Image (cartoon, rainbow, N blue to C red):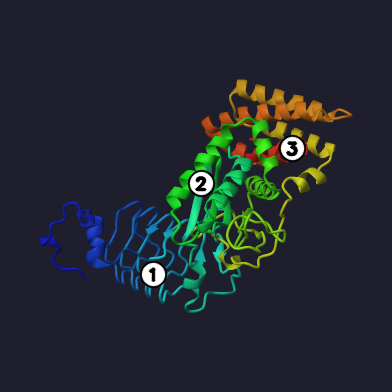
Amino acid sequence: MAKGLEFSRLENTYLANPKIRQLVVTLSGKAQEFDGLNLEGVNLKGAKLENASFIGTNLNYANLQNADLSKAILKQTQLDGTDFTGATLTGAFIEDWNITTDTKFDGVHCEYVYMCLPTPDNPDPHRKPDNRQEVFADGEFGDFIKPIFDTLDLYHNQSVDPRAIAISFKQLAENHPEADLRIVGMEVRGEDKFLLRAKTAIAADKSELSAEYFATYNQLKALAEQEVKALIAEKDSRIADLQNMVVTALKRPSFYSNVEQVGFMTNNPGGFSIGGSVGGNVNNVQGDNNRAVQGDNNQAVQGDNNQVTQQNQVGADAAESLTKEDVVKLLAELETLIKGAELPADNKEEVVEDLSAAKKATEKEEPNKQRALDRLTSMAETLEKTTKTVDSGKKLWTTAKPIIVKIATWLGAAAGSHLLGL
């Protein structure tokens, strides 16, 4: 127990906060809330922190040796250099926590963890191990949670362009073979947010790589459609493969791509190639809600031998399985959703009008797909803007998006279109 704190100079330290001072003195924080506090470097060795909440808390370099963090909430907690040696983490909620190579997990006691916070609909969210009859054996949790440390995280937002991503990444890999770039994950993070994660050589300058990538990406996004198509035509077919993977990830809320050990993008007919050692394959796996433990919610399936799942199937299954009648029904379903929603009258009228026009164009003996697609695009833009400003419309937008994407795919929307990136 800490002593003599009353005689210490506390200005400009975390101990200036009475709540933190009490925690350090008593080492008792059970079921208490410490969200958003700066506890960097705090000594909580042996502390009782069961059910405590540390959402967004800075615990970098904190001493949590032998602390009891059973069922603690560690969502988005900063944990660079934090020492969990001998700590108990059974039942902890570790959604998007930020651990690094310097985070210590030696001798951690942990039977299971949850990858997300609970909700009324899902009080037992994404437990690991998945089998609720199983628990981590001694020493297993540290191996399970070990993140991919040396990664280049390329975050995209606002109208993600899969074609620009594919070309930009290929160009980066060709310009920097020494970086040994290998894609290890793709995630959709809310509306208009997409993460492409690539493993790099330890010595790679990630800041420089990121700056170069986005310089190319932003230039490509500014090009006209025909200019982008011309660029793709000049490159090999593997750009299209990566583009397809990105589109699939954007379209499917449950899609998770985990790609490990893929080869050069120049000469590897046996597999999809990005940069790095020759001879790899694309490895796509299905995951849970695209959640991540340091970027990977499916760490058990990382590695070089994962099997290809849905490669080059972007939109193909949806387009081939739907009939004209199915699409008309989907449009009618959308119309019903809109009419029953609480939206401004003018906006609702405009959206319904576009939907009606799209349905009529689709119902024709020879569907006018381009006209239907144009009206669907107009409808989606109006609806998206409206639901961003009207609280009651947010749930509607979440329900409507996957339906719009299905319809747009059948109508032949371009791979990089805004509709397929919803």
Comes first in the chain, label 2 or label 1: 1
Q: CA distance from mark 2 to mark 1?
A: 27 Å
Q: Nearer the viewer, mark 3 or mark 1?
A: 1
Task: Report the residue marked by disc 1.
Answer: 104
Residue at the bottom extreme? 138
Q: Is residue 36 above or below residue 135?
A: above
For mark 2, does the 10 Å Cα neighbourhood hold few (<14), some (14 to 19), or many (20 or more) residues? some
Q: Is residue 20 left or right of residue 79?
A: left
Residues 200 and 418: in front is: 200
Q: CA distance from mark 2 to mark 3?
A: 27 Å
Q: Nearer the viewer, mark 2 or mark 1?
A: 2
Please name the amino acid that badge 3 sits on: Ile
**Quadrant the N terminus occupies:** bottom left
Please name the amino acid that badge 1 sits on: Lys
Q: Position of residue 389 (x, y in %)?
A: 52, 30
Residues 231 and 107: in front is: 231
Task: Report the residue marked by disc 2.
Answer: 155
Q: CA distance from mark 3 to mark 1?
A: 49 Å
For mark 1, does the 10 Å Cα neighbourhood hold few (<14), some (14 to 19), or many (20 or more) residues? many
Q: Is residue 63 above or below residue 399?
A: below
Residue at the top extreme? 346
Q: Which mark is residue 407?
A: 3
Q: Position of residue 308 (x, y in %)?
A: 70, 60
For mark 3, does the 10 Å Cα neighbourhood hold few (<14), some (14 to 19), or many (20 or more) residues? many
Residue at the left extreme? 7
Comes first in the chain, label 3 or label 1: 1
Q: Position of residue 24 (x, y in %)?
A: 24, 64
